[in-house]
Image (spheres, coloured by chain):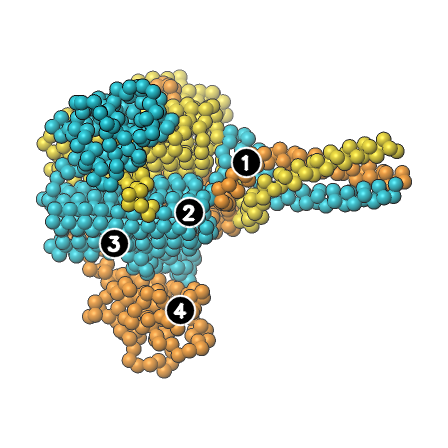
Chain colours: A yellow, B orange, C cyan
């Protein structure tokens, strides 16, 4: 369904395969593939792809769709192709990593759209004379680039972005509409930042104010910064706070989904990925290659080792030193069942005591019974 | 307290009742109602309404306020009115659905404010020449309407809205300030979108990149779209991501509160309502007329039947095929009680084993006791 | 590392101490402190502070850093200073509350940056002629100030802020870029509002619409307002909805972190602080001086007493009448351990019954055993 290219932009299948292989993949058309090769204008799922689109099979559960798809071409593993027991209506593309090829193809098609985006600085943008805007960069309508900010070559800012004083963006970044960087925020190359992202807001730091008293709080001005590595993507409405004194640090290749909250002084290791609605409290350090599933929460001042995988909705309240998967979710149930069982939860300590007491009785009983038997 | 209309805009009570009845309600003034009828300028709760305002009673717990309210008029059920044991100081309005009449009245009064909002395209807005703006539509200051976008008749955009390339808005929509639609997002008629809403940001899709290695992720460009039906309301800072290949779909009449996250390829059925802070992971399908209470989380790739009601804070981790209410929340307690009981949670498997072992002993004991008795 | 002042702005240490003492602290340099006193340009942690910066020791765990820090000066408690067993390389500042002095110093240094922000109304801003802007206020690029809005003396709005019709901001507020106030929102003095904050969006109110039927919802227009006291700070992307009929109220001195959701008609008592990702459902009343830790959720229509402390990730589903700390979090564990134990959760009611039955048997056994003994 999502035809992405105009008829003139269509690519012949062999060309497309050749292009993708340049990234290091090793895909090919089977020997003696039927001519003429289809010209491809888009990418779709097996169910939705039409006769001008390419599709792919990576999930074995969808295998049965192969005989029904309308796709012009389908990427599939060589062994899946070899085992086909019918003559496919599509042109097969043999690839050991069909999912990765799909990812690269989707990028390739989307690039056509991206390359059509406006270039240059929109006349409505407010760019401070002391800011530097690199060659080929694009600044959208109503953007504000403050004093001393630097925007790298080829980076593109959608409408309404704000780059605070002295903040820096690397090369070839893509900021969608309405991204806000406070002052002193540093983002590496090739970042993708989605709408509503806020980088560098104040961390949540207060000291009890005994002078004002009555529970009043004194603000601890947050004078640290935010440092974000290369190849980082940050989803819509996610916030990364600036450090209190030192910096909040997001490593290279980190992927953050929407509505995530990264508090002040957190460190996130390289290539760690977090799904939506995750919250990470202050000063926590997360290792490399971790995955944190949706709506998980991490307490402050803890450490997660490399390669830790946290299940969705889990509260991690203490450090994790070993790789592996960790979970803590209350299992859902029909409401009345839950009610009955939840009522017992608060009595667990008591239940254990009663169990122990029974066990002691049973032991004594066994002894006394042994005694009784002896007496017999 | 919230007087909404100027003295000139005040409506007489019989007029107001007549107006609301046009929507299909059947409300009336009691026979022989006292003249002169009050002129109404606003709507308030029983406690706060003043002598120029109408109020209502729908919650029986508030019945005692009837004798004390300062309201000029009160909507109440006919049977409640019949059972009053005092002469009310207010003009009663008899209505079988007082809460619904309240809802319609609140809309009616708010409409006066809405109709006073600026019309036309603000001179500061950036509207691409290829975009279409329907008759009577309003485009606020600093809005950006990109190439090929279409905005239906009578739709109003607050300040700072962005409508991406090729996106479409139906008729009579109300976008508050600072709503962002990416490209390829389609919204039906009469939508209400609140500030900070982001529709069509990229879904969270990555494939492990074995070529780069080291845990690096390859982005899967998200080339699907977002399709939203008619009569949908979406709360502040809620995000609905675009589909990976196919579309993310929100049905007619769906109501989403603030800070909700709808991931790529999710389908939400008609008239389903979700309270704030709910997260729905990718490809999940939710039926019609469901209610998902605040901060509940739904895992990806699951299905919820029609008429499923999920309690607040509950993690739904597998499909639900039957209507009904489902819950899974850890009951809170004073911290020390929680600590004692939570410590036992991790031993539940062990406790069950010990219980079984006791039961076996008890059974054997009963047998041996029976044997003993026999021996006697 | 974060040197904040230019060489010309540097302050001599005795001057700095004198300045801070004006706020009511009682800090001093030790008698016979070595001349010349350092000139201070910034503030850093013991580990990162350089020779032009001041640091502090409040966490006893960091005591060992005292002998290694490069800081020019260090704030520490008099008794810690007295017990030092080495001649410090830094100039000591003796202060009974080092953490509070750090907070005040951070404010003091940040103030230099803040005072350098642009003044006046940016020419691109759209300010309605009927709006009032107080003396010394600053309105950033692309701000929109609607009819009848009032902005107090000395308040500063970053880029892209929207102040709705009739809304009011007190004196000396600081709104970062992209804060949105709907109409009828009232904020006191000295507020700090971060990017993406939305105040006054519609509360989530719908009545079943039996006329449309099929599960359709009728919108309850939200005609209440938002009232926020003095000295309130609200974090990035936090939303506070307007009341349905009456108002949503945030007390003086309340501190809200990022991505918090405050629903309609909630009242938050003075000096209560909430960490990120907290959700508070409609009409709930929270007392004074409470702390709500990250990702906790409060159900609607409940009350929390003063001085209640809710642990992170806890769902508070009913009222709390006593001060104290409350918790309800499922303890996390390695996934397989969790699976085993969670499977037993749904059987708790059954386990308790089995335990009771064993206890009865044991009692009867004890009786029968006593009887047996008697018979002997």
Say which element carries label 3: strand
Name, please, the residue furthest toward the front.
Answer: C32
* Mark 3 vs mark 1, CA separation in Å: 46 Å
Say which element carries label 4: helix
Say which element carries label 2: strand
Query: Looking at the rendering, in which quadrant would you find the N terminus of chain C?
Result: top left
The answer to which of B45 and B282 lies nearer the viewer is B45
* Mark 2 vs mark 4, CA separation in Å: 31 Å
A345 vs A274, left or right, is right
Where does the image place residue C47, in percent across and percent down from the top left? 30, 23
Instruction: Determine the image quadrant of residue B76.
Output: bottom left
Q: Which residue is mark 3?
A: C185
Instruction: Determine the image quadrant of residue A183.
Output: top left
Q: Tag on residue B65? A: 4
Q: Residue at x 87, y 33 (%)?
A: A375
The answer to whether tags 1 and 2 share a subunit is no
Chain under callout 3: C
Chain under callout 2: C
* Mark 3 vs mark 2, CA separation in Å: 28 Å
Q: Earlier in the sequence, mark 3 or mark 2?
A: 3
Instruction: Determine the image quadrant of residue C159.
Output: top left
Q: Tag on residue C308? A: 2
Give the label, 1 or 2, closer to the camera. Answer: 2
Q: Is residue B132 above or below residue A252?
A: below
Chain under callout 4: B
Q: Earlier in the sequence, mark 4 or mark 1?
A: 4
The answer to whether tags 3 and 2 share a subunit is yes
Q: Is residue B174 above or below residue A362?
A: below
* Mark 1 vs mark 2, CA separation in Å: 23 Å
Where does the image place residue A224, in percent across and percent down from the top left? 26, 30
Q: Tag on residue B343? A: 1
* Mark 3 vs mark 4, CA separation in Å: 28 Å
């Amino acid at each position: 369904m999502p035809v992405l290219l105009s008829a003139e932009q269509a690519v012949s299948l062999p060309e497309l395969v050749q292009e993708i292989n340049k990234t290091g993949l090793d895909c090919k058309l089977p020997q003696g593939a039927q001519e003429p090769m289809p010209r491809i204008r888009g990418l779709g799922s097996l169910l939705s792809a039409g006769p001008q689109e390419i599709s792919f099979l990576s999930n074995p559960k969808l295998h049965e769709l192969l005989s029904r798809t309308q796709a012009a071409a389908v990427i599939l593993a060589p062994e899946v192709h070899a085992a086909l027991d019918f003559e496919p209506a599509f042109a097969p593309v043999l690839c050991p990593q069909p999912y990765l090829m799909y990812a690269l193809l989707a990028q390739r098609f989307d690039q056509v759209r991206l390359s059509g985006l406006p270039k240059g600085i929109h006349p409505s943008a407010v760019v401070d004379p002391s800011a530097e805007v690199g060659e080929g960069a694009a600044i959208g309508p109503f953007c504000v680039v403050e004093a001393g900010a630097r925007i790298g070559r080829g980076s593109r800012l959608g409408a309404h972005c704000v780059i605070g004083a002295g903040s820096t963006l690397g090369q070839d970044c893509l900021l969608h509409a309405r991204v806000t960087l406070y002052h002193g925020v540093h983002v590496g190359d090739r970042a993708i930042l989605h709408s509503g992202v806020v980088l560098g807001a104040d961390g949540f730091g207060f000291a009890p104010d005994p002078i004002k008293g009555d529970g009043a709080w004194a603000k601890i001005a947050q004078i640290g910064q935010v440092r974000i590595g290369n190849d980082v993507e940050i989803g819509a409405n996610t916030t990364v706070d600036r450090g209190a004194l030192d910096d909040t640090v997001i490593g290279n290749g980190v992927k953050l989904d929407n509505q995530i909250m990264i508090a002040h002084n957190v460190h996130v290791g390289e290539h760690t990925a977090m799904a939506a609605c995750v919250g990470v409290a202050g000063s926590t350090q997360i290792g490399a290659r971790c995955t944190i599933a949706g709506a998980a929460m991490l307490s402050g001042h803890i450490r997660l080792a490399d390669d830790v995988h946290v299940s969705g909705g889990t509260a991690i309240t203490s450090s994790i030193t070993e790789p592996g998967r960790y979970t803590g979710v209350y299992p859902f149930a029909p409401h009345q069942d839950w009610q009955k069982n939840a009522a017992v939860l608060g009595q667990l300590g008591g239940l254990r005591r009663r169990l122990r007491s029974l066990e002691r009785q049973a032991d004594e009983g066994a002894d006394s019974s042994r005694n009784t038997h002896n007496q017999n």
